[in-house]
Amino acid sequence: AQSVTQLDSQVPVFEEAPVELRCNYSSSVSVYLFWYVQYPNQGLQLLLKYLSGSTLVKGINGFEAEFNKSQTSFHLRKPSVHISDTAEYFCAVIWTQGGSEKLVFGKGTKLTVNP
Amino acid sequence: DAGVIQSPRHEVTEMGQEVTLRCKPISGHDYLFWYRQTMMRGLELLIYFNNNVPIDDSGMPEDRFSAKMPNASFSTLKIQPSEPRDSAVYFCASSGTGRWNQPQHFGDGTRLSIL
């Protein structure tokens, strides 16, 4: 069965430090990849997505992610975080094969940015 | 522009009662998604509609769950009878034509507690 693994459930960092949130998925057969952010008591917002083309994807709020097919990874990065980036981040993968599609979310990574 | 509107924001009820969650998607969006979020299972896609027609309900956990979309501006998710393990945050999301390559816009969720 398809699965999405976010290796770190919690990531604490200091303000202005770089951060990488990791996401791995179970197979690289035709996939679409997404990162969403969730602030407390709110729904999810799309940060960025990979559908095809360049493997480096830039999103909102200075985030970017790189699709690595051989490693079946889609790690999220930001070179310098702000306090306001404190939130939970979800990786989502859609597998498409033979006309069927399957969407799976990772369990999320709570990013805490400390002053 | 109004976003996705969900009601109620909070619902507390006793097991065995019928629960109805409501969603108003963004005007013009033709895809509507229902999700459930729990600590144990993370975010799960329950069902989604295209042009008011259910496309994939494979994520609906049991027959106690049902969803309808009588028109383009309204959808309901019903649980009858409700059980304590149904306690979760339920999100509705909508997107425009393109299903997966358009961003999903999430509501703020309904926090459901079954006693």
Image (cartoon, helix red, strand yellow):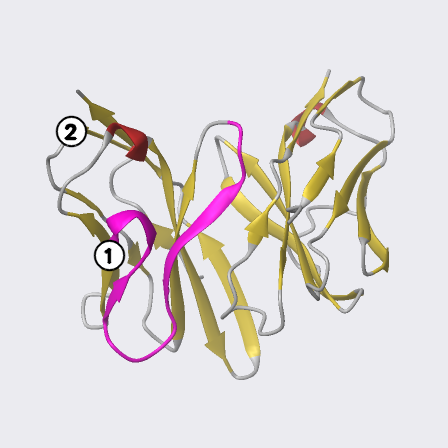
Query: What residue type is disc 1 on?
Result: Glu
Residue A8 location, x and y as percent?
A: 25, 38
Residue at 80% from the left image edge and 50% from the top image edge: B75
* Numbered disc total: 2
As drawn, is A108 to the left or to the right of B97? left
Please tell me in which quadrant of the rendered image residue B30 appears.
bottom right
> Which structural element holds mark 2?
loop
Residue B58 location, x and y as percent?
A: 66, 59
Residue at 54% from the left image edge and 39% from the top image edge: A43
Residue B1 location, x and y as percent?
A: 64, 49
Q: Residue furthest front?
A: B1
Please tell me in which quadrant of the rendered image residue B59 appears.
bottom right
Is-magenta flag for residue A46?
yes
Query: What residue type is disc 2 on?
Result: Glu
**Separation (CA) of disc 1 from disc 2:** 18 Å
> In which quadrant will I find the C terminus of chain B?
top right
As drawn, is A94 to the left or to the right of B28? left
Task: Name the residue beneath numbered marker 1.
Answer: A64
> Which structural element holds mark 1?
strand
Local packing at callout 1 (Cα closer than 10 Å; few below 14, some 14-19, many 20+) is many
Task: Name the residue beneath numbered marker 2.
Answer: A15
Highlighted range, magenta: A41-64
- Chain holding disc 1: A
Residue at 47% from the left image edge and 56% from the top image edge: A104
Q: Using the image as rendered, state which of residue B19 and residue B15 is in the foreground.
A: B19
Q: Earlier in the sequence, mark 1 or mark 2?
A: 2
**Up-down: is B29 above or below A11?**
below
